[in-house]
Amino acid sequence: MKGYGALLGFGLAVIAVAGWAGGRGAVIGGGVALAAQLAALALLRPAMDAPQSLFLARWFGGMGVRALSLGGLLAVSATHRAALPLLPAALGFLGVLLPLLFVETRFLK
């Protein structure tokens, strides 16, 4: 649980930077990215010492969670442009997810 709290704190800091740079849409996109990353890590973490087939199945599941989250965010922002601008939301998602992916290995140890 300690690793998830540190990842959550780091993610919230990155969301704050994204919100400062991109506004409300970037904060929403960043929040979706953080939720997707936490779900993907919760899926993968129990299989870290499992056989390779189980590990890869959970790893691909985590990639699917991230991809579906991005697809859902883009679908909502494309259909409700007044409420959620497309470009800031997409850039906020990617701007938060990429740093979280880089530090993911620290939280899986």
Image: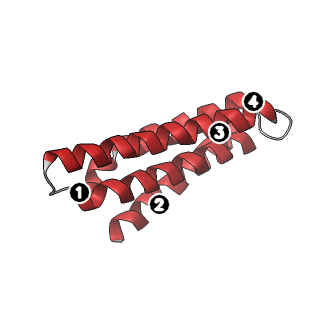
Q: Is tag 3's residue or tag 4's residue first in the polypeptide sequence?
A: 3
The reply to whether discs 4 and 1 touch (Cβ–Cβ < 8 Å) is no
Amino acid, disc 4: Ala
Alpha-carbon span between mark 4 and mark 2: 28 Å
Relative image position of residue 29 (x, y in whole percent): 63, 42
Relative image position of residue 5 (x, y in whole percent): 42, 67
Q: Is tag 3's residue or tag 1's residue first in the polypeptide sequence?
A: 1
Amino acid, disc 3: Leu
Q: Which mark is residue 78?
A: 4
Q: Residue 47 carries which label?
A: 1
Alpha-carbon span between mark 3 and mark 4: 8 Å
Alpha-carbon span between mark 2 and mark 1: 21 Å
Q: Which colour scheme is used?
A: secondary structure
Q: Is tag 4's residue or tag 2's residue first in the polypeptide sequence?
A: 2
Around disc 3, counting alpha carbons within 10 Å, would you say few (fewer than 14), some (14 to 19), or many (20 or more)?
Answer: many
Relative image position of residue 15 (x, y in whole percent): 58, 49
Instruction: Locate the C terminus and report the quarter of the image it occupies.
Output: bottom left
Residue behind mark 3: 73
Q: Is residue 40 left or right of residue 69?
A: left
Amino acid, disc 1: Ala
Residue sitting at x 48%, y 61%: 9
The answer to which of 81 and 57 lies nearer the viewer is 57
Q: In this view, does 79 lie above or below 12?
A: above
The answer to which of 40 and 27 lies nearer the viewer is 40
Q: In front: mark 2 or mark 1?
A: 1
Residue sitting at x 69%, y 34%: 75
